[in-house]
Image (tube, rainbow, N blue to C red):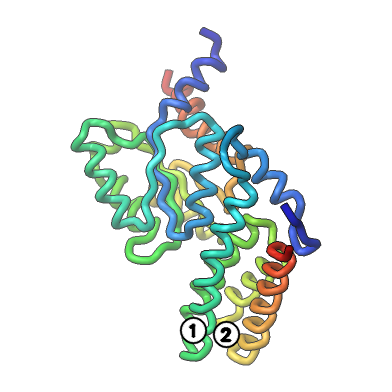
Amino acid sequence: MRSNDKNSKLISDLRVLVVEDMSFERELAVAVLKKMGIGHIRTAENGSIAISKIENSMALMAPFDLVITDWKMPVEDGHGLLKWIKMRQKYKAHGMKVIITTSLLDENDVKEFIQQGADSFIVKPLSLDVLTKKIHEVFVLDQQKAG
Amino acid sequence: MKTSARIDPAAWEALRELQTPGEPDIIATFLTIYFESSEVLLKDLQQAMAEKNSKALVHISHSWKSSSYGIGAKTLGDLCSQLEKTALTSESGQSLLVAAMEREYLELKAELLSD
């Protein structure tokens, strides 16, 4: 199998949770992921709902591989969700990755994302090119480094 | 699909890239979602102004900014960005910006939805 075929299979097999309070951006993320060939996409409107869905997916032995979460949200924000995921060994052991989406960005934000353990971040609005590149960096390059 | 000089064509091109054959027109789908959420945000904005709630103005303009840039409504996105940056420090500018946002949104909607 050629390397590109392997990568596209890997990406299309990802189980992804999109966490975003705004319907427009949530549906945009879903459309981008579908276009990338990803079939298993679930959504949550805030970090609290996301935590329930992540726990359920783990209980069903089919945990998410990737959480794409907005940083600023009501109820439970991206900061709280990221911290919750990264504090739990079972998700680390599974290799669950977190990509932050944000429309504000300065050096302090980047420092905070990294300190809190985010695997990557994207400045909104999402686009096919940027999300494809980030997912490739987070999964494919990460595997290549490990392998 | 009608367009408007208020829309950045690059944003619609990016959305069209996401069109799946056999699915409903993606621009129409996203415009529907955008207008639905914008109606709610506009009401929230007016309520926040009436209550002089600057923190709510920041939050609402932040949310509206992202979806406006996403649909290509650059001028409205820029106005939202200005309000988000200044709402906490300049009460006097709030009403002017909110009025400009409302006007821009209603004109955009009229242009895109007119027969």
> Which type of secondary structure does the marked residue at label 1 adopt?
helix
Which residue does the image show at 71% across and 62% down from the upper left? Answer: B112
A47 up-or-down from B24: above or below? below
Which residue does the image show at 24% across and 39% down from the upper left? Answer: A89
Task: Please tell me how crowded label 2 is: few (under 14), some (14-19), or many (20+) other residues with Cα within 10 Å.
Answer: few
Looking at the picture, how far across and down is residue A86, in whole percent? 31, 45
Q: Earlier in the sequence, mark 1 or mark 2?
A: 1
Chain of the residue under label 2? B
Q: Amino acid at mark 1?
A: Ala
Q: Which residue is mark 1?
A: B48
Q: Please name whichever residue, A34 or A113, is drawn nearer the observer in this view of the structure.
A: A34
Q: Please name whichever residue, B52 or A24, is drawn nearer the observer in this view of the structure.
A: A24
Q: Which residue is mark 2?
A: B89
Q: Quadrant of the C terminus of chain A?
A: top left
Which residue does the image show at 29% across and 35% down from the upper left? Answer: A63
| For discs 1 and 2, the disc positioned in front in the rendered view | 1
